[in-house]
Amino acid sequence: MGKTIAEKIIAAHLVSGDMTRGSEVALRIDQTLTQDATGTMAYLEFETMGIPRVKTELSVAYVDHNTLQCGFENPDDHRYLQTVAAKHGVWFSRPGNGICHQVHLERFGKPGKTLIGSDSHTPTGGGLGMLAFGAGGMDVAVAMGGGAYYITMPKMYKVNLTGRLRPYVTAKDVSLEILRILSVKGGVGAIIEWGGEGVKTLSVPERATITNMGAELGATTSIFPSDENTKAFLRAQGREEDYIPLSSDPDAVYDKVIDIDLSALKPMIACPHSPDNVVAVDTLSAVKVDQVCIGSCTNSSLSDLRKVAAMLKGKNIAPGVSLSVSPGSRQVLTMLANSGELTDILASGARLLECACGPCIGMGFSPNSGGVSLRTFNRNFLGRSGTKDGQVYLVSPETAAASALTGFITDPTTMEPIPAYELPERFVLDDSSVLAPLPVGEAENAQVLRGPNIKEFPKSKPFADVLSAKLVLKVGDNITTDHIMPAGAKILPYRSNIPYLSKFCFEVCDLAFPERALQAGDGIIVGGSNYGQGSSREHAALVPMYLGIRCVVAKSFARIHAANLINAGILPLTFQNPDDYDVLSQDDSLMIENIKDGMAKGQLILKASGREIKLSCDLTDRQQKILLAGGLLNFTKEDGQ
Ligand code: MIC
Ligand code: SF4
């Protein structure tokens, strides 16, 4: 039987398991990346493992999220990351050098390799033909130490592309169209492979926009073939030797095939507050815009910003609009500056922000009260922008630029044409902001510098056979990690201070939750379907664990969050009959007995006010052991792995 691209890479990296869909496989990981908001925790975890030097081919620590320095917290964390990276064999990308996914694509990604990153948009690397996964910090720490990465062998979906995008219709519109078709749950448990004749019309940066937003589908990852366009991109980045061709076999078997005719697409827009709330841009043309933000790991490549510069050249943005532009990397910014296109952007009235995540994670540039903000980003979850009643829409850079000029949501195909973008023969290559780790001899005695904001890692408890707990919070469908553990400029600096962070847990849903959970002792959260979608932040598991949460019972879970819950020692359980969700209420006293036996059998009974509710407990042997040990760190210590 023929293989898909992902199956070929998995087969070449298989450490254990069999590749039947639905069973667990362990993969050897070639590369890892971390960013600062999840990285401090990941390196603290790595340090507790006592391994002197990373065992991967390449590991990189980026600083791109917490770049505002409004006090000692962030700069202390940057210094910690720089020194811990240097000591343990990890490359360090300095703050200002760019967004991890953009820089990794430009300088380090390689077709055919495996990558895990402590950020859910790590699948951006799939644009280069890498098998790249978002993961929790603990999983990345284990991979840095040479341990395998465990996933459930996914289903394989294929998106078959035909035709060619019309001018002003973009890769972002492809991403929004697939979200419209599949929804934020549609990719759960699947790897999405992009294929068909239309693939050769898309450059690597365009492919990377599409694999980046596969995260919003809940997909395990997304991947493109590696072909002549991949080779041209790598050549222009001065690393043609990293190229290998990769394609699926003609008789590869897919569980689902979706056809998209690129020629038939229109500019699309995701409305508040979910990336799958998608309609065509031309249906919203009367909506007045307050703010436009161009950037993020989805849309901050040179090609994106060149097109924006061409549209803005010689024009002024509408007086009622505030426009920000954050280039994805120093390479992009330098090339825009050298060509004079940066001047075209600035002369239009745009504000230039740092090469970092910035407004995407609420690090400044929040919209005004109730403001309409058009963003080229990938997430528009409630409150993520920093303004709770902000109305955030997701669009392509072209729709963003057109709307900034007119002051209303504007279909860019109504604007005057701009020249087609050509990949440069050679990008500007300057890696001086990526610092090499110390050589082995020097590393041993190097000091790691920690600031006072780094607090002790919370301790999780092993499971006894009976759990009596209070139902401390009941929430609905599609709860994101931004609901569970919000980010933003005020809270992000405390990512290595779990006790402080805990005060903000579920802030968007229920301000009283942290206090109630602490008072209850052992607690259980009840959720709807797709619980924990979005970010890979393990804080969305570590903080509830700190607040005493022992189980989350939901209709279904997002993949990375379920793995993070298990790593933190919290039991994820699903309703066998989704209607049972309705009979549970906040403050119910709940009981689960025979936990060990039930875990092994895959079924546990939840006792709630005289009723018995059947819950599924879909755990591999390894996951059961992790939970019984009280989380991955305890398990790793006990197991000596
Ligand atoms: C995000 O886009 O939500 C983040 C911030 O990049 C997160 C990581 C984090 O919470 O630090 C992600 O996508 O995993
Ligand atoms: Fe940064 Fe936003 Fe990308 Fe997350 S989605 S990595 S916050 S740019």
Image: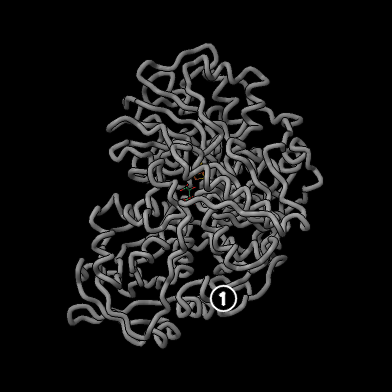
Instruction: Quadrant for the N terminus, please.
Output: bottom right
Q: Is residue 39 above or below residue 610?
A: above
Q: Is the residue indicated by label 1 positioned so its CB lies within 8 Å of ligand 1?
A: no
Q: Nearer the viewer, residue 608 or 216?
A: 608
Relative image position of residue 598 (x, y in whole percent): 39, 85
Residue position for label 1: 637
Name the outermost residue toward the top.
314
- Residue at disc 1, secondary structure: helix
For the C terminus, the image quarter is bottom right
Could one spot residue 251 in this view of the protein?
no
Quadrant of the rendered image containing residue 10: bottom right
The one of 49 and 274 positioned closer to us in this rendering:
49
Could you tell me which residue is drawn at 67 percent across and 19 percent down? 339
Residue 303, image quadrant: top right
Describe residue 479's horizontal placement relative to residue 341 as left or right. Answer: left
Q: Is residue 573 above or below residue 434?
A: below
- Residue 387 appears left or right of 30: left
At horizontal 23% and vertical 63% (from top left) the residue drawn is 516
Q: Residues within 10 Å of mark 1 (few under 14, many from 20)?
A: few
Determine whether, in the image, residue 41 is placed left or right of residue 15: left
Up-down relation of residue 630 to residue 301 (above or below): below
Query: Where residue 60 appears, x then y in whole percent?
Result: 65, 50
Q: Nearer the viewer, residue 229 or 118?
A: 118
Residue drawn at (34%, 66%) of the image: 555
In this view, which residue lies farthest toward the right? 241
